[in-house]
Amino acid sequence: MPTSAKARPKPGAVPKVVIIGAGFAGLSAARGLARAPVDVTIVDRQNHHLFQPLLYQVATAALSPADIAAPIRTILRDQANATVILAEVTGIDPKAHEVVTTDGRIPYDRLIVATGARHGYFGRDEWAVHAAGLKRIEDATELRRRILLAFERAEAETDPVRRRALLTFVVIGGGPTGVEMAGAIAELARTGLAREFRRIDPRSARVVLVEAADRLLASFDPALSEAALSALAGLGVEVRVNHPVTDCDQRGVSLGGYRIDAETVVWAAGVMASPAGRWLAAATDKAGRVLVRPDLSLPGRPEVFVIGDTANVAGPDGRPLPGTAPVAKQQGRYVAALVGARLRGRDVPPFRYRDLGMMATIGRKQAIAQFGRIRLKGGVAWVLWSAAHIYFLIGFRNRLAVALNWAWSYATYARGTRLITGAVAQSAGPGPERPHRPPVPSKS
Amino acid sequence: MPTSAKARPKPGAVPKVVIIGAGFAGLSAARGLARAPVDVTIVDRQNHHLFQPLLYQVATAALSPADIAAPIRTILRDQANATVILAEVTGIDPKAHEVVTTDGRIPYDRLIVATGARHGYFGRDEWAVHAAGLKRIEDATELRRRILLAFERAEAETDPVRRRALLTFVVIGGGPTGVEMAGAIAELARTGLAREFRRIDPRSARVVLVEAADRLLASFDPALSEAALSALAGLGVEVRVNHPVTDCDQRGVSLGGYRIDAETVVWAAGVMASPAGRWLAAATDKAGRVLVRPDLSLPGRPEVFVIGDTANVAGPDGRPLPGTAPVAKQQGRYVAALVGARLRGRDVPPFRYRDLGMMATIGRKQAIAQFGRIRLKGGVAWVLWSAAHIYFLIGFRNRLAVALNWAWSYATYARGTRLITGAVAQSAGPGPERPHRPPVPSKS
C-alpha cells in the first residue's frame, strides 16, 4: 500500500477518508460513513471522546472524568470500516494529500478536519497561567485541584486579607460555560463543603461572574438572561455585566478601575480555533476559524472539509454558527452524507443548520431553555436539561453512572469526586518555618 | 494558644493528639478518639483517604479514582473534636513536642505516626523509573496510562520485535498485589480490549508474573497458592517462581540468565516504610519500619506511637505483622483506646493482632481466602472477596458506585474507565518523519 505522496484513488480502490479529531464533529462524520464504501481513519491525540458540555461538573467535583469520556475505540468498535489512530497531528500536506503526525504520515483521498478549539485570550496569552480554561479532562482536573486547594489553603491561612482572596472565585465570561461554572462553584461552597472546615465557613466564599457585554447569555432571549441572573443571585453569585477584563495577574483581575483580589480565576470568555487554518494555508476569521464553502469544503480543495469549532459557517442570520455540540454533530453528519453521495455520483444541497434550541443550567433545579418560540426556566428547564444531557452522553454505562451520581448529589448535596491529585503540599505554603496556626477544634 | 516549643498539657487543658497520615491506621485512630476528651488533629499531604486494596483496579481501568477515595474532611465531618490539615510533614521534633510541616509547626501532647510505606527496590532505586509501583492514586493513573498506551503503540508499530515487547507486561512480586495486577492485566487484554484494535490482537499479549521465592502468595496455605497458580494459568498468565529479578531497564527485565523484553513493568515486590524512623531518630528494621514497644509506643517516648506500615510489630509467630489494612486498623483502634484509657488513669494490655483471615483475588470469579483453618477458592471465595471489599469501602456512595461498576463489568466484560490522561502523543513515536503504517480496515 502506498505510504508516500501522490496517493490518489485508483479505479476500483476503496477511497480513504481521514478524519482529524474525535470530538462531536469528527465522531459524527465517522459514524455517518459506517455504510459508505470507504476506509475511515480517525486520528486524535487523546484516546477518548469527551462530552465537553459536562466538563464543568468534573471541574467542580460532581462527576468523575470517566463519567463523561469514552474510549474512541470502544465507540467505533463495531464499525468495520473504521480505524482509530492515537497520534498528534502536526500539519497537513494538501498537495501530497497527507496528514502529518508525530507518528508518521497518513495518506487520504478525502480529509475531514474537526480539530476543535482552545481558549483564546484576545491576544493576552500571558493571562493563561492565571485564568484557567476548560476544554480537556486535564483542564478540568487542574481546575478542580485549584478550587479545592483554595479552600484548604484558606483553612490554614491566618492573614484575613489573604484568606479573603483564597475564598474569592472569579469566572470570566457570561456565556453558558461561565454561567454553569459560577453556579457550580457557588453550590460547591454553599452545600458540598459547608460543614467540613473548622476555621473557615466555605459558605462565605465570594463567587463573581464577569461579562463584558450588557447581559449574560447573549445568545438567549433577554427574559431568559434575566431568569439566569436571578437564579445566580439566589445562589449568592455576584454578577458584573458591562465589565470587560483589563488585566489578569497572580493576585486577581482588574475590570477597568475595579479590582478583585482572587486566588482562583476561571476563563470562559473566548476561544481560538485549532491551528488547522495555518496547516491548510486557508483564509480564517480572527478567531482562527477556517472560512469554508457552503458544502463545508475548503475553497479550491473540494476533497478537504472543515467542520465543528474549527469552521466559520454562516447561520441563517448571517452571523457564524456558535461552537456547540449540535452544530458540530450536524456538520459531521452532513459531510459524511455528502462524501457518500458524491461517491455515488450524486450531490446534496448546501449545509443548513437546523436549530434544535439551546439550554443552560445554573444550579440545583435551575436552568433555562429556548426552543423556537418556547421559553422555559426554573425546575422544568432543569429536568429537561438533565434528561437531554444524560441522553446524549455516549455509552449506556456513562449515562447510568451520571444519572446515579446526579441522583446521589441531589439527594445528599454531596460532591463525590472531591479528589485533589497532582501537586498538593508544594502549594500549601511558603516554607517549613512559618509558624502554623494552632489547631482549634471548632469554628473560629 | 502556643505555637512554639515546650507546649505541654497544662492542668485542665484539653490534650492535643496529632495524627500523621490518614490511611487505615491513622483514620482508625482518629475515629477511635471521637469520644475521648482530646483535640485530634490529623495531618495528611493528600486531601483523601485511599482504599489501597482496590488501587490495582484503577490501574487496570476497572474503577475511577473517586470510586476508591473519599475526602478526609468528609469522613471526619461529624467528629467535632477532629481537625483536618492538608500539609506535607517534613520532620518531627520530639524534644519540642512538635510536628514540622511545609505549612508550619504543630504542637502535640500525644503523637500517632501512621505515615505508611512506599515501594522499595532493595537498594536498586534506579529501577524505579522502569518498574512502576502502586501506592497512590497518581501511581495508578500513571500505570493505567502506561498499560493503555502500550496497546496503542503496538497498534501503530511495524517492527514485530518491538510490537512483541509492547505487548509484554511483567509484574514483579508474587504477593497479593502482584497476583491481582497480573490477573487484571490479563483480563483487560483478553476481554476488555479484545475487539477494539485493527492490526493487533490484544488477546495475544503476554503477561508474566515473576516471584523470587518458590511459590506465589507465600503467606497463604500452599494449597491456595496452587489454586491461584492454576487460576492465573487459566487467564493465560505465565508464572515464573524461583526467579529473582537481577536487572531492570528501559527494555525489560533480567531474571538471572533469562531475559524478558517488556515495555511495561509493574513493581509489586517490596516496600520501604516512610522516613518516620529517621524523623524520630528511632531504631528501625531494614525495611525502615520503626521498632516499637508492646503498647506500640516509641522506646523512651511514651507519648509517641508508631502504627500501620511504618511500625514493626511482632505477630504471634514472632515474625513482623504484614502491612495490611486489618493490621493497620486494629493498631489505630488500639492506640486510640490506650490514649483514652491512660487519660482516665487506667491502662490496657499490650497490642495483640486478631487474625481475621486473608483473601486475594485473581480475576473474574477467581479468588482465594483463608480464615483460620477454613480454606476457600474459586467462585465462592470471589463472592466473599467482592462483598468484603465493597463493605469496607468507606462511604456509602463509593460502595454503590463500585458495586455498579463491578456488576456492569461483570455483565459486559467492559472496562469503563479506560482514559489516558497526561502525556499521550509524545510517547507515541520517535518523530514526525517516520512513515506511518498505512491504515487497514481489518485485522492483519
Image: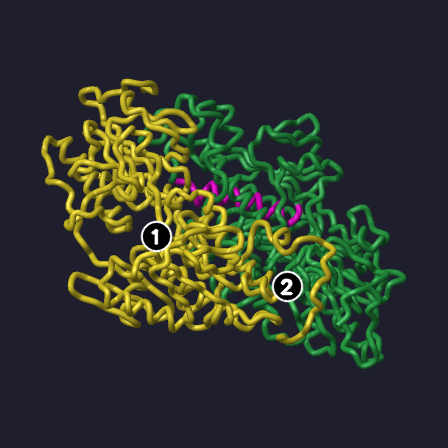
Chain colours: A green, B yellow
Residue A368 percent across, percent down from the top left: 61, 54
Image: A410 above or below B302: below
Residue B353 percent across, percent down from the top left: 17, 48
Horizontal side of residue B401 vs B343, given as left or right = right
In this view of the protein, can residue A9 be seen by the observer? yes
Task: Name the residue beneath numbered marker 1.
Answer: B395
Image: A181 above or below B1: below
- Which amino acid does the dot numbered 2 rest on? Ala
- Which amino acid does the dot numbered 1 rest on? Gly
* Chain containing mark 2: B
- Residue nearer the viewer, A416 or A44: A44
The magenta span reads A175-195
Where residue B106 sits, quadrant-wise, is top left
Residue drawn at 14 percent across, 49 percent down = B316
Question: Dot 1: few (<14), some (14–19), or many (≥20) neighbours within 10 Å?
Answer: some
In this view of the protein, can residue A417 be seen by the observer? no
Q: Judge depth for marks 2 and 1 and give the one in front.
A: 2
